[in-house]
Amino acid sequence: MPDQDIKVTTDAVIFRNSPDSAKREVLLIQRKNPPYQGEWAFPGGFVEENEDLENAARRELKEETGISNVILRQIGAFGKPGRDPRGPTVTIAYAGEAPYGAKVEGMDDAAKAEWFDLTDLPALAFDHQEILQKALNDLYV
């Protein structure tokens, strides 16, 4: 068996209808810490030892934004070499729908948490643009 040091993370791609109901929004956090400090990403983080993947996604979502009780669906695993400058990392991405009017707050290692119109997104950290495209293709086309 090869000796590997690969980390596992989860990311949550959470959508909601915009206040005018004509557009869709996605939840992003502004990273408080390196790498990509100050940049926008999906709520997520490292899976703890003996933690279920979906539970890790729920935990990180709640810790960083205050959102809970969202039905999550796994949309894929992403692990291209170099996706995380901290070293080899595979993320398991989940997508879900928050209720209309869901409020968020940046907490823990998220400096901010905000809803963004899907047609007016900032640049995304890591490979989160690829993850967003997968979520849109799989769930919301």
Image (tube, rainbow, N blue to C red):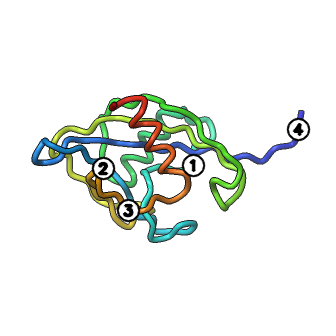
| Residue receiving disc 1 | 46
Residue type at mark 2: give it: Leu
Q: Earlier in the sequence, mark 4 or mark 2?
A: 4
| Residue receiving disc 4 | 2
Q: Which of the labelled discs sits on residue 118, or is there none? A: 2
Q: Nearer the viewer, residue 117 or 39?
A: 117
| Quadrant housing the N terminus | top right
Q: Secondary structure at mark 4?
A: loop
- How far is disc 4 from disc 2 in space, using C-alphas? 42 Å
Q: Residues within 10 Å of mark 1 (few under 14, many from 20)?
A: some
Residue drawn where x is 48% and y is 44% of the image: 11
Residue type at mark 3: give it: Pro
Q: Earlier in the sequence, mark 1 or mark 3?
A: 1
Q: Which of the labelled discs sits on residue 122, or is there none? A: 3
Residue type at mark 1: give it: Phe
- How far is disc 1 from disc 3 in space, using C-alphas? 23 Å
Residue type at mark 4: give it: Pro
Q: Earlier in the sequence, mark 4 or mark 1?
A: 4
In percent of width and height, residue 137 lies at: 42, 33
**Outermost right residue:** 1
